[in-house]
Amino acid sequence: MSLNCLMIGATGLVGGLALPALSARVRESDSGLWLPGRRAPEHMPEGARTLLGTIDEGRVSRWLNTELRGRNQRLDVFVSALGTTIKQAGSRPAFRNVDFELVRQMADVARHFGATRAVLVSSVGADPQSGNFYLRTKGELEAEIESLGFKRCDFLQPGLLLGARPGSNRLAEGLGQRVLPALNPLLIGRLQAYRSVPAEAVARALVAACLIETPGVYRHTYREIMNLAARRDT
């Protein structure tokens, strides 16, 4: 299976954890990995290509045109582990510029260069009709990605992520890591989707989803994420 991949969000919590396994799969399939972003990953995968600095549709398109057309290659997969919060972004418009506009633009570029599969880290509760701005934005993004014509879309919808985030409050983070997993057994039935989940499991699920070609649109909450993460082929 060809696995030429355009990935955004490779320096975040889930993206950084997924990158080693994803890049290994890319190399095994004799494919390429392109990583546009504001900064390079801490551990740059062998053979990966980067475009650093301000990322926009035109700049990435020109870069990929040079990278791919010169090698007579096309993309296969678009991966987004990009995400921020309204607090981190500073305002609702700034948050939407990252979590909706930038991701949509990069997905559109990937589709233009041949990608037929899209794998995105979204959020449990994502719904374009939600009264919550964050969840509505996530839901609108999912709908937009579906409309771009990918043959397969995988939306990973985790609850609260367990893992050390770069630049986070370590005291609050440490308390959360201990308290939140203890609540998981209480979340059963439909509430199971809202269980906290290790970021490492989401990362493994992301890589597993990249390796599946069956057409369709798939939304993965807690149970499905854990099942994907447990697949032996990742």
Image (spheres, grey):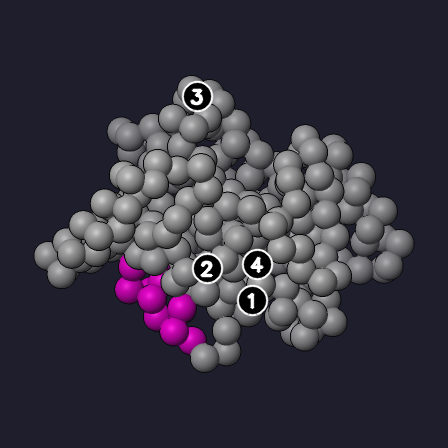
Q: Secondary structure at mark 2?
A: helix
Residue 21 marker? 1
Q: Which residue is mark 2?
A: 203
Q: Is residue 145 above or below residue 186?
A: above
Q: CA distance from mark 3 to mark 1?
A: 33 Å
Residue 155 forms part of the magenta stretch: no
Q: Is residue 195 visible?
A: yes
Q: CA distance from mark 4 to mark 3?
A: 28 Å
Q: Three-letter amino acid code at disc 3?
A: Gly
Q: Secondary structure at mark 3?
A: loop
**How dense is the environment of label 4, judged by Cα within 10 Å: few (below 14), some, or many (20 and up)?**
many
Earlier along the polypeptide chain: callout 3 or callout 1?
Answer: 1
Q: Is residue 89 above or below residue 17?
A: above
Q: Which residue is mark 3?
A: 90
**Mark 4 and mark 1 in contact (Cβ < 8 Å)?**
yes
Q: How many marks?
A: 4
Compared across the picture, whether 108 is left or right of 94 comes to: right
- Figure quadrant of the N terminus: bottom right
**Mark 3 and mark 4 in contact (Cβ < 8 Å)?**
no
Q: Quadrant of residue 223?
A: bottom left
